[in-house]
Each structure stands twice: as C-alpha cells, then as structure tokens.
Amino acid sequence: MTDPDHEPEKTILHVEKLVKTFDSRKILDGITFDINKGEIFGLLGPNGAGKTTLIRTIIDIFRPDAGAVTLFGRRFSDDIKESIGYLPEEGSLDKEILVSECIRFFAELKHTDEIDRKMDDWLKKLDLNEYKNKKVQELSKGMHRRLQFILSIIHEPDILILDEPFSGLDPLNIKAIKDILLDLSSRGTTLIMSTHQMDEVERMCDRILMLNAGKTVLYGRLDEIKQQFGLSIVVHYEGKLPHLDNVLGINDYGNYAELIVEKDANTQSILKELVNHVTIRKFEVKQRSMNEIFIEVCRK
C-alpha cells in the first residue's frame, strides 16, 4: 500500500510488509505505512488487532518474521534508542524507590542532560512536584500514569510512541497531557498514538492506520477517510420516527436519534419526510464520527 503523502525527505518512520507470527498465528500480516516528521499519527483497532505487537516491533522489542522497519532512513540500532520515547499501556515500576530516583534512573539510561532542571519542570507541569521525594507506591493510578509519561519524555525524543496515553487519567489530566502533546507536535516531535478514544483521535490526529485481525483496514488522512463513509444526521424530535429512504441505520434514543445515510443522500428530502411525521427540535448534518466508522469497519 503506497501513501500518497509519502515524501522520502520528511518520512521519519517507514514500515514495509511487516509480518509477525506467534504460535502459528499471524499477528501482523504484511503491514506497510509511513509516518512523517512532526505529525500526530493514530494507530487504531480493536483489542487483539496487533497494535501493541506493531509498536514493540517498531522499537525492536520483537523482531519481525518478514518485512522491515526503517527509522530516520536506517535500520534500528542502539544509538537510535535515545531518539525514541515509549509510553507502554501498562508499565511496572519499582514501588520502593523515590519518584525522583525513578526519573533519574530512566533519564540517565537515555544520557539526558540537565536532569534536575528537567525533572522539576515536568513534575511541576504534571502537578507531581509534592511527590518528588515520596515512594512510587504512594502514587495513585493517575499519578503513576503521569510519572510514566515523564519517563517517556524527559530525554526529549524525536519520536514519542504512546500506547493508550489517557488510560487511568481524569478529564483534567487528559487535557493536560493532550495540551503537552499538541505543543510537542508543534515543535517538531513526531507522535504515534495508539488509543481507543476516538474523540481524541478526531481532535488530534493528522493521519491514521487502523488494524483488524493483523491486517490494514484503513490508512491515510483522517479527513479523506471520513469522506469515504456516509453522512450522519443528528435529530432531536418529538413523536415516532417513520421509515426513511436512503437511511442505512438509526441509533434511536427516544427524543434524540443519529441517522446514518448514504454519501449522496438528499438530506433536505429526509428533513421534509421527518417534518411530516414528527416535531423537529434540531436537525444537523455532519460527517460520520470516527467512533461510528470504527464500529462499522470492525464488524465487517
């Protein structure tokens, strides 16, 4: 599969016909894609689709059975590691050490300079400064997740790979992490984000790759992918919805419904038909959401 936006001079990661098998089962089946410098790239798919295996193959935790991964125009090597940050979905940290010791250990592994200054900046930014000299075991789940984020970013990597970055975070900290990621992207950091939170994908991602059962099912610019699918009509109404032509599906919640319609459907005709049967309080035509597209593609 060729990426129409692919330009060798701006491609920071290239994956070519990647295959990975465990116990005779293909977890990755010929995956090919590019990621460009500075973009936010969404890696999507249901549980078991192969996302985490793909991430671990990219960063050389797993070796592929076939295919190749190229970072910065060359094969993976030890000196590349310092240019990559990785936030795993679940991580195990030594609970008996201090938060400051934990950060220092990981920062030194990546040969980070000015560790104390960077540590204090990140602890303050993520509201963990009062826990600097407390043990990791004293952190709540959300605090633990924020600490893991600091570990992934303190060495200022060129590529940051995040597996479910918002897991375990409350809305306030989701916003804090999201704002940090958008700022990093604006300054040239390449972000690869695996997540099930489709609303964040729509707000943040430039392009996406969606896997299902180890195969590519969607790949490309988010806006272009959404144009491939039908429209969605949001209607607030009173009464009983009638049968409607050119409507592929209805999610009816009583006085509120989402109508999925064909791409070329005459939405004004649908509105007129609705007006003949129910009282309309709101009628809005929009592109299908990524959540709807995700469900539709995964059910095929």
Image: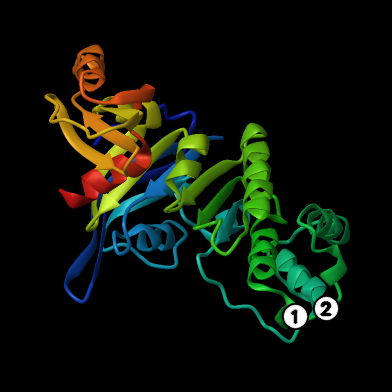
**Drawn side of residue 126 relative to residue 229, left or right:** right
Q: Is 163 located above or below residue 131 in the figure?
A: above
Amino acid type of the residue tagged 2 in the rendering: Lys
Query: In the rendering, which numbered label is found on residue 208?
Result: none
Residue 13 appears anywhere in the view: yes
Measuring from the top left, give residue 222's x and y in whole percent.
39, 32
For the N terminus, the quadrant is top left
Near mark 1 (Cα within 10 A), the count class, few <14, some 14-19 or many ≥20, is some
On the picture, is 169 further left or further right than 248?
Answer: right
Give yes or no for contact between labels 1 and 2 (Cβ–Cβ under 8 Å): yes
Q: Foreground mark, 1 or 2?
A: 1
Q: Please tell me which residue is depicted at 20% across the width and 13% down the height of the picture.
A: 269
213 in relation to 142, above or below? above
Q: Which residue is disc 2 drawn over?
A: 134
**Among all residues in the image, which is located at the extreme bottom?**
96
Three-letter code, disc 1: Glu
Q: CA distance from mark 1 to mark 2?
A: 7 Å
| Residue 5 in view (yes/no) | no
Q: Label 1, on which residue? A: 138
Displayed quadrant of residue 190: top right
